[in-house]
Amino acid sequence: MREAFPFSAIVGQEEMKLALLATAVDPAIGGVLVFGDRGTGKSTAVRSLAALLPSMSVVRNCRYGCDPAAVTRYCDDCRGRYDGVPLPAAKVSVPVVDLPLGATEDRVVGALDLERALADGVRAFEPGLLARANRGYLYIDEVNLLDDHLVDLLIDVAASGENVVERDGLSVRHPARFVLIGSGNPEEGELRPQLLDRFGLSVEVRTPADIPSRIEIIRRRDEYEQQGEDFIARYRKKNQAVRRRILAARERVAGVVVDDAMLGQMSRLCVALGTDGLRGELTLMRAARAVASLEGRAAVTIGDLCAVAPLALRHRLRRDPLDESGSTERIERALAELRAGALGS
Ligand SMILES: [Zn+2]
């Protein structure tokens, strides 16, 4: 199979790229909701980013992709084999798993392996998509059309980092840490506000209207398809630079300072916009910290806050949450007031 389209060759899509980079630095930011037209390469960007991340070390033959070094988070199988020495490792690339719309809950969380149950009379577990997505990305095209209870389940698992299956006489728990990426078309089906709130970031992907960008996109897409390896090779250095930037940012992110004054600015912004609860501020803080870290800064600046505020907040505003342009304008206005010191203390 051909290598993914190089991340550094993607034209435009600045919000999408920023969100993917930020969540690659700190997956605790949460999932990313992608709003946009069809055919804007939403899933391409996810695959491109995953492809440039360094391959990960997994326990050899583990069906859940356990991290050999994270002994406390081993699955039941690995825990059973563990005797004080980390289990043998293998290298695999960061997974991007597609969750098709018609997928059953069994397929997603895993289920009793019927073949083995019938043939050998054993209750064995057949892992599902969540097992494959562990430590990578779970991509759902048109998440707004997915069953509500399935989306709830996915968000719960993504937040807890663990998939627990208790049924059909099975009792299985395995690690399932992944970044959930859901794409939606604002015109088709609404997402419940509670659900919107639980995605960390939301981004808009549009087909660019300016001619030079469109020409460049078409040219690169054509070259990728016609030249394959040669095209990919041309972007290898740039991709490596992005990878180094992510790795360095991961190292530093925990130490990036968000002082009380900056947190106060974030709170003022959320109060002015009327976002419910505190999840908005928490996401804003984490996303701003990740971006500051990507920029090599030791502390979060107002510029970092402004860069991530639309992504962290636009899907949390009341009114029609899918009226994206309206939400973005409201946030931009509030940010201008914040910068001018007009949002009070
Ligand atoms: Zn394992």
Image: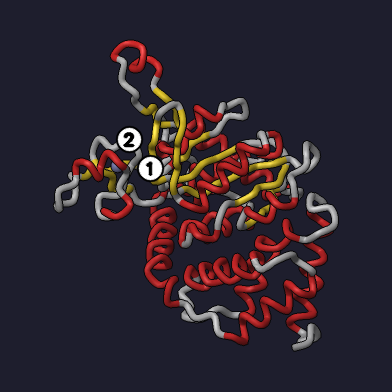
Q: Residue drawn at (37%, 28%), measured in percent from left and top?
A: 125
Local secondary structure at mark 1: strand
- Asked if the residue under mark 1 is in contact with the one under mark 2, i.e. CB atoms within 8 Å, the reply is yes
* Residue 168 or residue 267, whichever sits in front: 168
Where does residue 32 sit, x and y in percent of width and height?
Answer: 60, 51
Colour convention: secondary structure
Residue carrying label 2: 63
Q: Earlier in the sequence, mark 2 or mark 1?
A: 2
The quarter of the image holding the C terminus is bottom right
Q: Which quarter holds ligand 1?
A: top left
Amino acid at dot 1: His
Give the residue drawn at x 45%, y 50%: 161
Task: Give the residue at mark 1.
Answer: 174
Res. 220 in view: no
Left/right placement of residue 98 relative to residue 244 reads: right
Asked if disc 2 is less than 8 Å from ligand 1, the answer is yes
Q: Which amino acid does label 2 sit on?
A: Arg
Image spot of residue 251 (x, y percent): 37, 68
